[in-house]
Image (cartoon, rainbow, N blue to C red):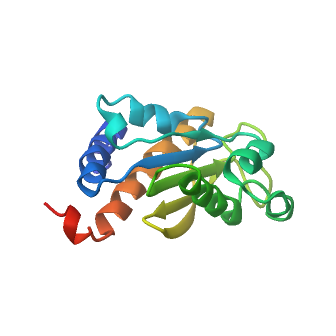
Amino acid sequence: MSTAAPDVAALVAELARLLPRRGWMMAPAESCTGGMIAAACTDRAGSSEWFDRGFVTYSNEAKCDMLGVDAAQIAEHGAVSQVVARAMAHGAARQSRARVAVAVTGVAGPSGGSADKPVGTVWFGFMIDGMLSSEQRHFDGDRAAVRAATVRHALERLVALVRATPEDEETQT
């Protein structure tokens, strides 16, 4: 791995530093990673200070039932889409005490891809203190590589977005 890319444990350590300073909790909503983001976060001792809960919403029904994603949006855009990633992030924040939510939905492979959404396509949704954003990435490799890259990217972006969000005056140290 390149020294320019922090490893997952270092990214989690940075979230563990940043989130408690603001009094914020985090909640991931995961499809293609099946709980790997939550596992990475809760591997760190003391994570209960900043990690609220995780949602593993692998099926479309789970996305609707647990996160309030509109089934019509899934039918129109597909589960691997910007609309669904954003709805998942919004739902994770709404269904928890989290001010920080990340959602991932993608095609990890080895099958399931299409011309429009090839294997390795992942949509990310981020809700940071009420601000919703999203982005798409494509990762190369087998299923394990795509899932690992998804976790790493989700955590990298969370760190960057939290850093870019001004702290309330009463939470600054």
Which residue: 70% across, 59% down? 84
Query: Dividing the picture into quarters, in which one does residue 51 lie?
Result: top left
Q: The N terminus lies in which quarter of the figure?
A: top left
How many marks are shown on the rendered structure? 0
Which residue: 59% across, 60% down? 90
Residue 30 place in picture, x, y as percent: 60, 43
Relative to 150, is 61 on the left or the right?
A: right
Q: Is residue 15 above or below residue 145?
A: below
Query: Dividing the picture into quarters, in which one does residue 94 lie?
Result: bottom right
Depth check: 121 or 90 in front?
A: 90
Q: Does the rendering let one see residue 123? A: no
Residue 158 place in picture, x, y as percent: 40, 56
Relative to 116, is 53 on the left or the right?
A: left
Q: Does the rendering let one see residue 13? A: yes
Residue 101 place in picture, x, y as percent: 49, 54
Which residue: 50% across, 39% down? 53
Relative to 48, is 52 on the left or the right?
A: right
Residue 105 place in picture, x, y as percent: 65, 50
Which residue: 74% across, 42% down? 62
Depth check: 68 or 140 in front?
A: 68
Q: Is residue 73 above or below residue 122?
A: below
Q: The C terminus lies in which quarter of the figure?
A: bottom left
Relative to 22, is 80 on the left or the right?
A: right
Q: Is residue 160 above or below residue 37?
A: below
Q: Looking at the image, which residue sits at the far left?
A: 173
